[in-house]
Image (cartoon, coloured by chain):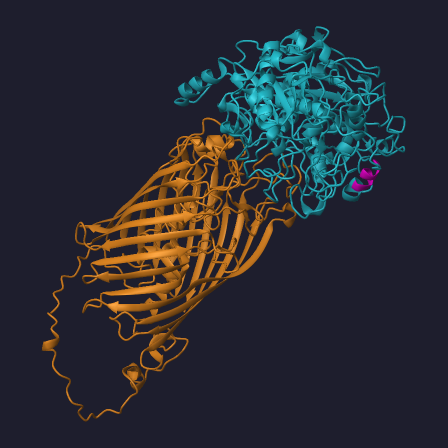
Amino acid sequence: MNMRSASASAALIVALVLPLAAEAGKELINTSAEPGEETLVSQTRRAPRRPAPETTMPEIDPEKVPPPAPHLPREFLPIPDRWRLVDMLGVPDRWWDPYNQNTLKGDRPIFGKDWFINLAAISDSVAEPRRLPTGRSAAGTSGPGANDVFGNGDQFIFSENIILSASLIKGNTAFKPPDFEFRITPVINVNYATAEEAGVLKRDPRSGTHRYDNHIGMQEAFADVHIRNVSDRYDFDSIRVGIQPFSSDFRGFLFQDNQLGVRLFGNRDNNIFQYNLAWFRRLDKDTNSGLNDLGKKFREDDVYIANLYIQDVPVVGFTSQFTVVHNRNTENDRFFNDNDFQERPAAIGDQRSRDYHVTYLGFNGDGHFGRANLTVSAYYAFGRDSHNQFAGGVAGVPADISAYFFAAEPSVDFDWVRLRGSFLYASGDSDPFDDKEGGFDAIFENPQFAGGDTSFWIRQGIPMVGGGGVNLTQRNGVLADLRTSKEHGQSNFINPGLILAGFGADFDLLPQLRLSTNVNSLWFANTTVLETLRNQGEIEKHIGYDLSAALTYRPFQTQNVVFRLSGALFIAGLGFKDLFVSSADPTGTGKDIYYSVLGNLVLAY
Amino acid sequence: MTALRSWGRWAATVAVVAAAFCAPRGAAAQNLTVNDVERIIAGAVAEARSRGKPASIAVVDRVGNVLAVFQMNGAPARVRVTSKRGIPRTHGLEQVEDTFVTIGAANSPSSRLSAIAKAVTGAYLSSSGNAFTTRTASQIVQEHFSPGELFAPSGPLFGVQFSQLPCSDLSVRQATNGVPAGVVSATLGPKRSPLGLSADPGGLPLYKNNVVVGGIGVEADGFYTLDNRIEDYDFDVDEVIAIAGQQRFEPDVNYRANRIFVDGRSLRYTDTRPTDLQTNPVNAPAFATITGGVVGDLANVQGYFSAAGGIVAGQTYGQAASGFAADPNGTFNFVGQTVFVLFSGGVNRFPPTASTTPTVANGGLTANEVATILGNALKVAFAGRAQIRRPLNSHIQVTVSVVDASGNVLGMARTPDAPIFGTDVSLQKARSAAFFSNPAAAAYFATYDASGTQLAPSAGQNANGVVIANFLSGVRNVLGPNALSDGIAFGARTIGNLARPFLPDGFEGAAAGPLSRPFDRWSIFNTGFQLDTVFDNIALHVRFADAVGGAIDTGATCTFFTQFATNLTRLSNGLQIFAGSVPVYRRGVLIGGVGVSGDGVDQDDMVGFLGLNDASGALGTGFSNAPHSLRADRFAPGGANLRYVQCPFKPFLNSRHRNACDGK
């Protein structure tokens, strides 16, 4: 396990920071997600323009391997094992130094010949001023003179995650997958939020305009058993049981979470083929940290996943993935979150509970065609919802789910500049009262797309003020899916859908400094659902323009100290202005401006 | 229908939809004929017989005239009024579930009264833009909206069940009965309801050609209750019988309650499936074959219906005989739209009138000021976006009332299709604002005295033994020792905040508001100060309507507070505790109130608040909304400020102007 410590930490950051739905800094993703494996895999991506190495491995024939040579007298002093080699060279093992050989970082066995331990600690701090459409509570306000629904939308969040991780690994070399791995990753979160309006942070308007909360979540707790190798190149089958990170596709469009599950995975044909067969029984989340909450009952929600990655299809340098994902939800009980808001069933429509099962057929691809990079994702969702909560009426109205999703992000690199285009289409529902549900929704999205959490629309959850106890779009989500939350809510296939077209550019200004910029324009695919929820006609489709920029500073050119400052301005389009009022412009005659600022410091050991 | 303007590409769609919805409606005046009523009753009776559930069935017209009360042989004689929450008797109208006992000194109401209350509710809550039922009413009067969504604020029409009260001075009596009776007429509306509005499933509206023409109410199960579980499919025999009676007089599916969303929650129309009917009402035996004692008979209900007179035809809403018709005098021509007013004796019953308390000389509103307030309020309504009506982009439909500082009616006016219930409610709200904002309010609490009635409670108490003045000390515990005599301005929304079983509204575990009851004793039949001040009126009336020997009807004024003029208390049609009114001031002095009812509560608030604001600006004669410093939203019991008004999230049609009320 002589993996370099720094890159081990980098992988861990990616793996752990990424799924923290609430507060994580997410931008680190783009450099590391590797097909076929969840993000824990530490391989680094080939440079975009460099072709895959043409390697011709020598034929391996056990008959031709020479017999072991007899021990010969050596002139060296004996050492316990080869891991201690550098000790002999005078390089000390310092527990606090991840850059040199370090027993605590899995560089040397902790006991026996091949049992390693890898400890990591990451501090992830987020400070986030923002302005969201904010409704006042009918039950009470934070001051007099509040005569309208929309109040002051300025809010601030500070969140600190301390991510601790310990792995115990039985393995041998850098090339052979380890035989066993046991890992736990508790995350300690403290978070603090302020808002100008009462009843926003917690439902009780007396609780004021500040909220402090903390939580310890278990983001990883698994055992990984290497079942067998199936080729001389260590193609393998492995099984992993417990809370583990998983991403259903390259960009986290459908399901990217740290969830309790059983996963059989492996590869074939010199890693050309990679597969996953997984079952997750979802844990409920802590409301304010977004971390797993082992104190809550399991969600009655199962996710079954089968996927196959094939490298170099259709062209060398492009990996294609085919997947089938089945999500079955039978959550019939009322559930209120930690802030006393009802999460299940969603407080829209007739509030009757519902079950649903939905199957996603997906194709995802990532790689490059010549010097043009491309990521694509396409899903078709179909299934059955036991009750259309909009249809209300005198009987349960079962409905068929039929919805689709497509996203593509082409990019091209010019020396230190990368230009990106983003396009996304998520179908919307055209008639909320019928027995068809045509709005696309994901299971647990965490999209790294179109600017990711730098973008206002993707980063912020926007409450559907006046249209029920749901969010128009979720925090760290791109879909306009009208669910209560990613963390607790059920998927909702009666939604307006989304169209996104964007353009961005990344500039590697210095080895330590990257500037990312993004401009997105967003539209609802169909506003009928919104009009119904609000009893408001003629809601326009254009949501608005989302302008964002992020500076990422890595002073040591490592992932051990990363500072990121990003800011997004959202200029409301007519559709958004039809729905919401910015406190900056109550009259609706000028521009409605919202913003999202993210200051993020990651310190990793 | 609102003048339809649109932005570009939606125009065609909207116009088509609007035409589909609106062309038939209002195009022809509609009413229930005697034959219609017979068919309705026959259909209901057949279903009730099939189920072995004999029922009392009432049919009313849109303005509340009782067209028929048919009592099947074996129908429950009396009903048990209960929220099914285990609240013992003598707490409001609540009774123990398993025994027939009396409410206070009065008898339990008969199933006939229950049926009338349900029929009135179905008719009164509905319009050509919204079809609501008693089940809808149930959903919007409970401690949370929707029921079961803990911590959510109360239903938007919390307290509306105690409107259309039998003591209302506004409501028209069917016939005189020896006590001061206000307006008496066989045709005029709005008529009163014996129990107020009902939240018990089994009351539905009746439509002809998409025009609401009345309501049907059924009582067969013997419970006068509510549906407090929104999440289930609640089979209710009253409702299924009413559905049978409603056949051929059903509303279009496009504007039934379940297509109408309030704060994203759809309203409940019924929980009865079409397949639940055991009979086909079209094939029901004719009325002539079931009446006269064969299956049942028309039944007398004193003050409502005379069996000897037989079934009567319903009035045509919009004609002067119905009590509601277009303004005949051109008073509101400046509004630029057809404005309806109330009628009596062929003339506008409540034309704009100068204030008496205070007099005009002392700063009271002039007739012209009243007309300007009413007209400007209606202008807001015609420009505003309705919350409870379809098709989308309908304008607000409401009734507006203006009162003086004592609650004298200074004028009423309405949009043409405003639901009838808002007539009485708008006046309740206007008076409630004037009452609570009046510095004399505190002294008034101690004047309650029903000891001269047949119920003969002690002075200061109602027949349930509730000491009315205790509510004053409750309010003062929350708002300070001088509350209700210090001139603080209350709108109905603020009063509502104080009259919820949780303060702040909806927050489970919080103490009750000072005008309410602790939650373990609170129910929609025991709302606190609101009910306690009219309990005696209701109890007296139930005895009278059910012809308990020697019972004398309640008079045509609610509450037994001191009458400041003959048959007028400051709350002459009862207190109302949901939003939609503001007090009127001139140079810091209370001179009246404006009340609005008929659409979403935020719409009601805006029509009153903004209408008054606009009228103030139009005339510049010094009357206005309350000065900011006097408004009750500066109180923050527990840390959360009370609400004064809340205007809607998307106030207007054809305009992106929003936050219409902040700063005003």
- Does residue B425 appear to the left or right of A275 in the view shown? right
Looking at the image, residue B105 lies above or below residue B28: below
Does residue A500 appear in the picture of this structure?
no
Q: Position of residue B143 (x, y in %)?
A: 65, 39
**Quadrant position of residue B335:** top right
Badge count: 0
Residue B171 lies, in percent from the top left, at 73, 18
Q: Nearer the viewer, residue B145 or B382?
A: B145
Q: Residue furthest front?
A: B294
**Closest to the observer, A351 or B376:** A351
State which chain is coloured orange: A
- Looking at the picture, does residue A222 appear above or below residue B475? below
Q: Main secondary structure of the magenta part?
A: helix
Residue sitting nearer the eye, A237 or A311: A237
Image coordinates of residue A396 in percent, x first then y, are 48, 35
Q: Nearer the viewer, residue A539 or A290?
A: A290
Is residue B524 in sight in this rendering? yes
A170 horizontally vs B97: left or right: left
Q: Tell me, yes or no, whether the highlighted magenta stretch contains residue B469.
A: yes
Q: Is residue A413 magenta?
A: no
Quarter in which the N terminus of chain A is drawn: bottom left
Span of residues in magenta: B468-474
Q: What residue do we see at 39% from left, 51% from top?
A: A446
Chain B's colour is cyan
Query: In the rendered view, would you say A511 is above or below B12?
Result: below
Quarter of the image holding residue B573? top right
